Amino acid sequence: MAYMWLRSVVLYIHILAAIFWVGEMLFLSTVVGPYSRRLAPSQRTELFTALGRRSRPWAWGAMAVLVVTGLLNVTLAGIPLSALIDPRFFQTALGATLDLKVLLVVAMIAVALWHDSVVSARGNPLPSPPGQVALSAALRRRRQASWLGRIALLLALAVVFLAVRLALYL
Ligand code: HEM
């Protein structure tokens, strides 16, 4: 009984953290992105810098919680963590789903880190006064950040789909 409570609480925290991580990405891509397109480039940079500075610690805090509670979910479901790298476990439907999920999580973290490093702490400002070469480099970085953000979001949606499949096997 107490064990089922513990499992439920850990899964609850895991799902809340997933809402934070995915919610931030969805809000930026569906609301802030389209809204910012009608702003002047410098205002757009300012908006993304301000929002990014506030949302990033929450998003990465949520990711840390996701990894810790994710591994706890595995253990509490009675699966030893060593099974994650056992080829025999991978041959089961549960094992393949879990391993694929963890793999996509690693890929998603890598893409998100890459995205954040392109955006950089200064929010990728446009050069002023804008020289032609520096300007096109800044715009290229901005386009790259936008694509990396989209890829990270697609990976996150795939991870949630695998999470749903996973819960059906447990
Ligand atoms: C190392 C990383 C992770 C591991 C090992 C992991 C593992 C698990 C496991 C074992 C479950 C099923 C728990 C149960 O039903 O008892 C689960 C559920 C879930 N995970 Fe993860 N997870 C990880 C990261 C993530 C991430 C990054 C996200 C979202 C972006 C996520 C979203 C979810 C969701 C939404 C559920 C609930 C699915 C449902 O109940 O239908 N997980 N996770």
Image (spheres, rainbow, N blue to C red):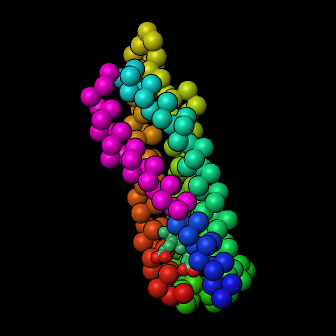
Picture quadrant of residue 56:
top right
Q: Name the image quarter holding the N terminus.
A: bottom right
Q: Main secondary structure of the magenta part?
A: helix
Q: Residue 38 vs residue 10: left or right? A: left
Q: Is residue 104 visible?
A: no
Depicted 89 relative to depicted 139: above or below: below
Q: Position of residue 49 (x, y in %)?
A: 49, 30
Q: Residue 116 vs residue 151: left or right? A: right
The image quadrant in which ligand 1 is located: bottom right
Q: Position of residue 170 (x, y in %)?
A: 54, 87
Residue at screen point 53% across, 62% down: 16
Q: Which residues are magenta?
A: 16-40
In the image, residue 66 lies in the stretch drawn in magenta: no
Residue at screen point 55% across, 90% down: 92
Q: Position of residue 150 (x, y in %)?
A: 40, 50
Q: Nearer the viewer, residue 84 or 37?
A: 37
Residue at screen point 59% across, 55% down: 62
Q: Which residue in the rendered view is the most extreme toward the top?
A: 129
Residue at screen point 55% across, 34% down: 53
